[in-house]
Image: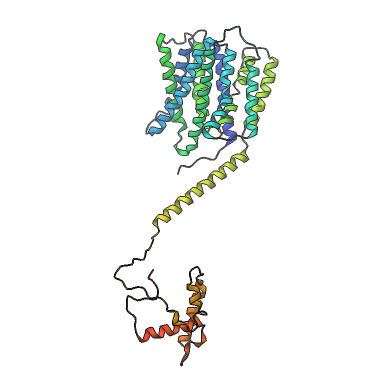
Amino acid sequence: MAVVPAPRPLMGAVLLLFVSAAWGSAFPLMKDLIHRLAVEDLLAERYLLAAITLLLIRPGCLRGLPRKTWINGAVLGVMFGVGQVGQAVALHGLPSSLSGFAVGCGVVITPIMALILFKARMQRRIWAGVVLALAGMTMFTLLSGMEDHEVSVLALVVTLAAAALYSGHTLLLAHLSKHGAEFNAYALTVIQLFTIGLLTGGVAVRDGISVPSSGPDWLILTHLAVVSCALGFLARSYGQTHVPAVPSAILMSSQPLWVAAISVTWFHEKVGWSMIVGGGLMGAAMLLALPSRTSAREKERMRRKRDRLAVAARASRALADLRIKREVSLRAGDAPTAYLDKGACVHIESCPWHTRSLKGGGEPSLERLIERATLIVRARNLPGVGCCQSVTLLGRCLCDLMEAAEQKPAKASQRWFRSQ
């Protein structure tokens, strides 16, 4: 049985906040770089460079992997890659603020999908965190100002579908992370990045792929590939092993908070009331999403208890299968088994054997049988006639029968009791 590491929610939350910060830092840099480089080309180059970077760090990470790891990595890459392509294509028909809000709706789609697919029950504080995160997302996107841009309904639907794919990616990654030693986070990340790079590259290669033409643009692309993609996806794979899917989605939905901080710090944008209110709502949502260490320990204790009960049940079934069931075989030619005669006792109605042999009567306990057998053996060792008078009526009946059996041995086929 695979050993599942104990959850460390604080470390998982730090990793997921790093993911949110890394992805948030990518938005203003991409916003500046897409004026000189096509979006499809930028996506393909950053994901392929990220995959190559991780592969160069650990060249043997893909050797000897089971088929299931390749399939899971490819599925995760296809889900995220299709979402990236759909979001990039739909960006031409939507304002950037509305596209960001539609993608941010994944924080609501994730718990709904978890409830439908996995019957997962969330605490009230998690639902409150979801509501606060969506409210903060609204403040940062829709209420911060809409550009004068025509809105396409089809582009909005495609962006919402991309958000659903991102939510499914989060749920699937959380489900795979519960497999313990079978979950190879590093190799799974490399396979995902290669898959996303091939998908986005297939879209970009239609009209040729262009590369950055200046040193600063290459620096921006390097940051997007190494920090945002390689380290971001790797931290997400490790972080979700310690934090459940819905709190992970809440923590990673804080990207607008980091985007605003970077825009104010580096690009000297003015701080508006929407940033202040939205930042406060996002901060409250993150605090509600942080899992307590006590609840994590309690869940781990309950999981170990369930594992022990499962092992005990399997052991019980295995022992039951190995148990020898002995049966009494009766042949047609065998003589009938001899039973105690009712006349063995002088007074039949008062004979204990008679009352005990009635249908539905209780059998004498093992202690009483041992006690009576001991009395019979002791009485037989007494000298003189009437050696059985010191035992009970049942003992006297058995003594008489035993004396008769010694005088005339019974046939081998006739026994007082069935052989067990």
Quarter holding the C terminus is bottom left
- Residue at (46, 92) in percent of width and height: 385
Residue 56 is left or right of residue 409, and the answer is right
Quick check: 34 above or below 248?
A: above
- Residue at (56, 45) in percent of width and height: 302
The quadrant in which residue 29 appears is top right
Quarter holding the N terminus is top left
Toward the bottom, the furthest residue is: 384
Instruction: Find residue 234 and report its horizontal and vertical position in percent.
Output: 50, 28
Instruction: Find residue 188 and report its horizontal and vertical position in percent.
Output: 45, 29
Q: Is residue 61 visible to us here?
A: no
Q: Looking at the picture, tell me which residue is in the foreground, 74 or 233.
A: 74
Q: How is the image coloured?
A: rainbow
Q: Looking at the picture, tell me which residue is in the foreground, 250 or 36.
A: 250
Instruction: Find residue 136 and report its horizontal and vertical position in percent.
Output: 65, 21
Q: Is residue 279 visible to us here?
A: yes
